[in-house]
Amino acid sequence: MLCDFCKDNINKVDYKNTQFLRKFVTSQFKVASSKRNKLCDKHQRRIANAVKLARFMALMPYTRNQTVKR
């Protein structure tokens, strides 16, 4: 069984596209499991690395408490 990224032949994951990365984190901003994301190991690692880099660059919060409350 192929993951969605393998089907669409996506090889790069952009850390700057935070709306796209939000699909792969839980409500507490943890990286969701590969079973929940329905990704293969290779693409799960790439998503996890992109989320970590986006957090480091302050594009995504580490926890839910760091979100802006309006």
Image: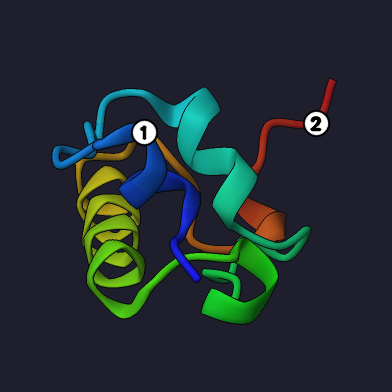
> Is label 1 in a helix, a strand or a loop?
helix
Determine whether 50 is above or below 63 in the image.
above
Q: Nearer the viewer, residue 36 or 56?
A: 36
The mark found on residue 69 in the picture is 2
The x, y position of residue 21, in whole percent, is 47, 40
The x, y position of residue 4, in whole percent, is 48, 47
Pointer 1: what residue? 8
Q: Nearer the viewer, residue 55 or 12?
A: 12
- Quick check: marks 1 and 2 in contact, CB under 8 Å? no
Residue 16 position by quadrant: top left
Which residue is at a point 36% across and 68% down the rendered structure image? 44
Say what amino acid the circle numbered 1 marks: Asp
Residue 32 position by quadrant: bottom right
How far, Cα to Cα, is label 1 from label 2? 36 Å
Counting residues from the start of the chain, the first of labels 1 and 2 encountered is 1
In front: label 1 or label 2: 1
Residue 54 position by quadrant: top left
> Is label 2 in a helix, a strand or a loop?
loop
Which residue is at a point 72% across and 65% down the rendered structure image? 28
Q: Residues within 10 Å of mark 1 (few under 14, many from 20)?
A: few
Q: Is residue 43 left or right of residue 23?
A: left
Say what amino acid the circle numbered 2 marks: Lys
Q: Is residue 17 left or right of residue 67?
A: left
